[in-house]
């Protein structure tokens, strides 16, 4: 039976962030009989992605501390979703936003951010998110008085948003049933903050980070850490396991989620669910018993980062590559 909840009345779209639903993936579960797999739908946030949480926390914390004032412009590097979130929050709160992003991010993300009045600055498409980071640092160094640079990759408010929100919500939604948690590595904020909250729970929960298996990959928003600028907020010791996922596996799972579950999601979400299914199969085979003791069958929770409509106009040449 579906659980009910009280309808909320809010004063600003900023207050609509969080309290996202969770859906059971019954079709995907058939590949791992007896194991429950749930997907937390972070695309239900008002900006359409999990990045609404850190963007909101970063802005509110910076405004409260006095670090971000209306005589400055917030500037940060983004592969798209955080940029949308910054843009939405900035418009709602009355602050100027500039973003540096790779020139080859999807047209949808460019259009959405500009619709909020955000200034876009493009970096070398072949350098990915690391190229955007390098360029934003150059801009800030040239005009330090003009910009407030929160740096989502090093800002503690990023994982704090997930510690306070995502992790607590997951425990509220599935409680003691959860045995495993899966999220992808980008800035790493979702993994770091959520995992720290889950590891405080009274029962053991295995927390697994998904990352692209290859340095050259097509899982937009995710980082292959060994070949990337490593975010200062990232601590691999926080996770119990790092699980590599191939680009094709993430893309194929995204297609499967649309066709079998009615969930149109992005490729990073596909990678997360692929990782969740890997763990579910291990559980079904009895290879994860130390984490499922007292909780027969196990329960895996993964993060749905964003919707698939942001990929309607992707880099179509990508699939011609051999990953």
Image (cartoon, grey):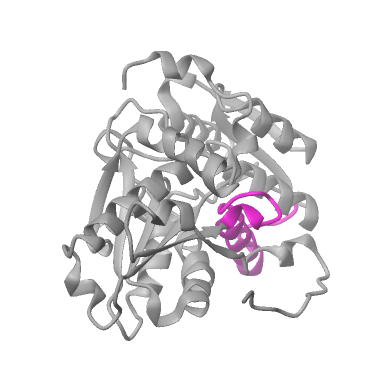
Can residue 237 be seen from the camera position used here?
no
Q: In the displayed orientation, state which residue is furthest to the bottom.
A: 202
Q: Which residues are magenta?
A: 42-70
Q: Residue at x 49, y 29 (%)?
A: 135
Q: Is residue 221 left or right of residue 16?
A: left
The answer to if 6 sits in the magenta stretch is no
Q: Nearer the viewer, residue 168 or 295?
A: 295
Q: Position of residue 313 (x, y in %)?
A: 62, 24
Q: Position of residue 274 (x, y in %)?
A: 37, 46
- Above or below residue 211? Residue 139 is above
Q: Nearer the viewer, residue 257 or 273?
A: 257
> Which quadrant would the N terminus be assigned to in this image?
bottom right
Q: Residue at x 55, y 22 (%)?
A: 104
Q: Nearer the viewer, residue 202 or 25?
A: 25
The answer to if 56 sits in the magenta stretch is yes
Q: Residue at x 37, y 56 (%)?
A: 233
- Above or below residue 264? Residue 62 is below
Q: Is residue 221 left or right of residue 206?
A: right
Can residue 49 be seen from the camera position used here?
yes
Q: Position of residue 277 (x, y in %)?
A: 34, 52
């Amino acid at each position: 039976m579906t659980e009910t909840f009280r309808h909320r009345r809010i004063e600003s779209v900023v207050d609509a962030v969080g309290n996202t639903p969770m859906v059971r993936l019954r079709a995907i579960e058939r590949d791992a009989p007896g194991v429950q797999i749930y997907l937390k739908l972070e695309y239900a946030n008002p900006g359409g992605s999990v990045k609404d949480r850190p963007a909101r926390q970063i802005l509110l914390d910076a405004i409260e501390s006095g670090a971000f004032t209306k005589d400055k412009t917030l500037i940060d590097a983004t592969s798209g979703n955080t940029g949308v979130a910054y843009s939405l929050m900035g418009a709602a709160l009355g602050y100027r936003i500039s973003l540096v992003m790779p020139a080859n991010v999807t047209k949808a993300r460019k259009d959405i951010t500009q619709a909020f009045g955000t200034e876009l600055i493009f970096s070398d498409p072949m350098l990915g998110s690391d190229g955007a980071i390098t360029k934003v640092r150059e801009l800030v160094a040239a005009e330090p008085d003009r910009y407030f640079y929160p740096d989502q990759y090093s800002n503690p408010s990023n994982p704090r948003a997930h510690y306070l929100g995502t992790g607590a919500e997951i425990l509220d939604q599935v409680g003691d049933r959860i045995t495993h948690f899966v999220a992808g590595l980008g800035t790493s904020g979702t993994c770091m903050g959520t995992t720290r909250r889950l590891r405080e729970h009274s029962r053991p929960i295995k927390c697994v980070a998904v990352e692209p298996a290859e340095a050259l990959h097509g899982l937009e928003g995710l980082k292959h850490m060994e070949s990337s600028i490593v975010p200062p907020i990232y601590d691999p010791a926080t996770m119990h396991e790092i699980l590599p996922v191939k680009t094709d596996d993430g893309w194929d799972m995204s297609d499967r989620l649309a066709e079998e579950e009615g969930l149109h999601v992005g490729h990073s979400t596909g990678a997360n669910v692929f990782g969740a299914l890997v763990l579910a199969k291990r559980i079904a085979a009895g290879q994860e018993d130390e984490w499922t003791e007292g909780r027969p069958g196990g329960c895996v929770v993964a993060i749905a980062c964003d919707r698939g409509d942001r990929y309607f106009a992707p880099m179509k040449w990508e699939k011609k590559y051999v990953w």
